Amino acid sequence: MSYTDLSVSIGKLHLKNPVLLASGTVGYGNEISKFTDLSKLGGIVTKSLSLKPRKGNPPQRIVETPSGMLNAIGLANVGVEVFIKEKIPFLKELNTTIICNIAASSIEEYVECTKILTPVDTINAFEINVSCPNVKEGGLIFGNDLNSVGRITEMVRAVTNKPLIIKLSPNVSRISEFARIVKEEGGDAVSAINTLVGTSFDIWTRKPKIKNVTGGLSGPAIKPVALAKVLEIKRNVDIPIIGIGGIMNWMDTVEFMIAGATAVQLGTVNFINPNAGVEIVEGLHSYCEKQSIQKLSDLVGSFQL
Amino acid sequence: MYIEKSRVEWIKNLLPDTYLLCVHSPLIASRIKPGQFCNIKVSESDFPLLRRPFSICEVDGEFLHFMFDVHGEGTKILSNKQKDDVIDILGPLGNGFDYTGDYSTAIIAAGGIGIAPFPYLIQKLADDKKVTSFFGGRSKNNVIEYGMKNLLISTDDGSSGFKGNVVQLIESQFDQFRNETVRIFACGPNPMLKTLQEFSIKKNIECQISTESAMACGFGICQGCPIENAEGDEYYLICKDGPVFNAKMVKL
């Protein structure tokens, strides 16, 4: 079973396997490490950082929906300075790839954060969140606009040599155009997808169940949408894709890889089964064995239409 | 913290819509403290998707007891569990009650199903602590007495005990504690906790409140369960920093 090569490469970022844990569903690694061995995973993507700490949105922040959940956390985070001082020492010891997610309210803030974090050795790559649906400034205002996504990619690229991944929004009509501009401006990969904008009402009070009115939909409910977005990018742009959206098990992971994802990120499932990542890596091993696949990366984009 | 596949030993009704569930969970049972909670997956499928948080009601050797009202789909599924069914339990989670220290009387204040964490707390309270319990319900049909000690009851309609809410009942009885050092332990709906918070601050009594919130993970990664600190400048997470807080620490 140990003969299968599960490793994948996203540009110059080499991962021991394609299973990453998604930003905002793993904090800065410490809580989830009580339930799972993070060193067995391809890596983790840390909670979105902004230059200064953010308090986040008032409650209620989350609500369950059919086979999914809506969240509007509002990018609550400790800020770059505390991250470096208090979170990096723990992350350093994890023996897994650390991808640092950055979310900002202005292009200057993205650049500033990346500049400050680039010298930190523990950080192996950056994921730029241009697609958070739950904050007033930045977020989707950038994620919906081709020029902004291009400009952010270009400006951040100019200040870091580390692998640069742009996390795309599904709340657009042609996601592949966004992937194309990321490639043109020097991005190494795209993550697809961030959450879908959704809402939910209490029929007795007629009020939204989430204080922010709308939130981001995640979980198995969005998997078919995410797969279609990954496929659209794969068929139109030559750029590595990290597939995200409702992955619950190794079978979903295989499905994303067939559709064109080089790696995947697990999100909502971490809340339910914090050991899901390790179980998926084991599942991938036995799938490869059964299918006589020697190198898992051969699976990427192997769909038969 | 553990994820433990736990076998149902029994389930019984306390009221038509209130259940007591007993599961065999030796690992969690050996660690859990009063006021802590577990996050329970009620089904093996993706519906409902998320776990449901329940405070620990009692521990009996290797067995955990949970008390719950049928409130939505998740608790409905849980109420239909039968002996030998297996459920997936994550716990123990959060910080429980601080019941040690220098005080002579524990006042238990429970609103409705907010009684759930108290049988275990009462079980654990040292013999040198006096206990008086107060329970508030809507009417005599909603009164739960399970696991209580020296219980006084209030109902909104006066059909059982004192007519009024549980905080009014406590206020009306408070004179009897004038020579005691008291500590209040409270759990119930937010308006009740808020009134009790004001009362305890006014009287300068230590009051510990068990709060609740919708949450996904239960251990700090989803950030879905914020509660504002008293200063209002940052949020605690109910799952990780609570669910029990000193009433002075939070804004309700």
Image: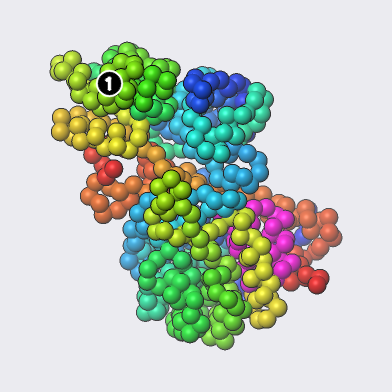
Q: Is residue A266 magenta?
A: yes
Horizontal arrangement in the rendering, residue B142 relative to residue B87 (left or right): left
Residue A110 position, x and y percent, is 41, 75
Q: Position of residue A283 (x, y in %)?
A: 72, 52
In this rendering, is residue B93 above or below B174?
A: below
Q: Which residues are magenta?
A: A241-268
Residue beneath the point at 46% across and 25% down: B57
Identity of the amino acid at label 1?
A: Lys
Q: Can residue A124 be seen by looking at this rendering? A: no
Residue closest to the far bottom = A184
Q: Quadrant of residue A55?
A: bottom left
Quarter that holds the C terminus of chain A: bottom right
Towards the viewer: B13 or A129 = B13
Q: Residues within 10 Å of mark 1 (few under 14, many from 20)?
A: some
Chain ID of residue with mark 1 = B
Q: Is residue A257 above or below residue B7?
A: below
Q: Residue at x 78, y 70 (%)?
A: A303
| Residue B107 counted in the magenta span | no
The residue that label 1 is drawn on is B163
Q: Of residues B58 and A11, which is closer to you in this image?
A: B58
Q: Taking the image as drawn, is residue A216 in sight?
A: yes
